[in-house]
Amino acid sequence: MSETNGTPLISIRNVSKFFGEFQALKNVSLDIGAGERTVICGPSGSGKSTLIRCINRLEKHEKGQIIVDGVTLSDAPETLEKIRSSVGMVFQQFNLFPHLSVLDNLTLGPRRVYGLSVKDANARAMKYLERVRIPDQAHKFPRHLSGGQQQRVAIARSLCMEPRILLFDEPTSALDPEMISEVLDVMTELAVSGMTMIVVTHEMGFARRVADRMVFMDQGEIVETAPPEAFFTAPESRRCKEFLNQILNH
């Protein structure tokens, strides 16, 4: 794990999360260093999305402790503000405002949260639209874009807040197959640039190419963590072997 001054950028300690009687996370612990690319995989319902939603407080954990960029997660408004400015999130569904242009979708956050002028917010938005390779779509509305383009807009919108950490929750699972690679290409470029990323995905080719570490979850627990080469060639747990057999031979 890459670390800054020996301190993880994200520290998850003995975290449990319940939905009523159902325990979605069971005593989960994980450290993630600055610049590290972590891919979380596992069967449906294993707790992957719940875990990353707890990191930016979209879900509230009941037990344990999560520290993000030196801030211990709590309900305090100033804590939430700090976390949301440090952590960007890209969802399975693009969550763009349909009544706003691409440019307005991107500038809304920086103007409201950071008080950027229209000029500065627009300049920042165009910089990140360039980065995700669709600057020519700035004045269109989301409905005029393909799914892959909409997801790239969603990535650019997160980047406009200039977070230290990006969370991806199955960002390609709602896309047609021919659009997946254009989104993965952008994510690969972000990974190469040194962005701290946690990616929940079933795209194992991407994971093998980009991840520093694989995390396999099942039934609310972290079952196995390993560098990609070891993870894919010599998984240790039976559950992990079965999962990889299913997904790689599908």
Image (cartoon, helix red, strand yellow):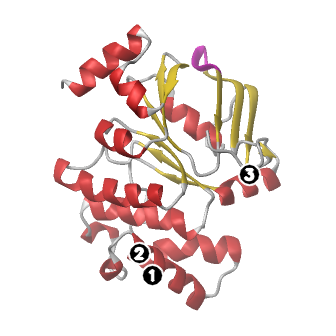
Identified at 25% across, 51% down, the residue is: 180
Decide which of tag 2 and tag 3 comes sooner along the chain: 3
Q: Nearer the viewer, mark 1 or mark 3?
A: 1
- According to the image, label 2 marks what residue? 129
- Precedes in sequence: disc 1 or disc 3: 3
Can you say whether 72 is above or below 188 in the image? above
Find residue 72 and report its image quarter: top right
Tell me the quarter of the picture where residue 55 sits.
top right
Q: Quadrant of residue 147?
A: bottom left
**Residue at numbered disc 1:** 126
Label 3: state its secondary structure.
helix
Tell me the kind of residue under disc 3.
Answer: Leu
Q: Whole-Å distance between the Cαs marked 1 and 3?
A: 27 Å
Determine the residue located farthest toward the bottom in the rendered image. Answer: 119
Name the residue that disc number 3 marks: 80
x, y (%) of residue 162?
Answer: 60, 67
Report the magenta residues as a range.
20-27
Q: Amino acid at mark 2?
A: Leu
Marks 1 and 2 in Cβ contact (< 8 Å): yes
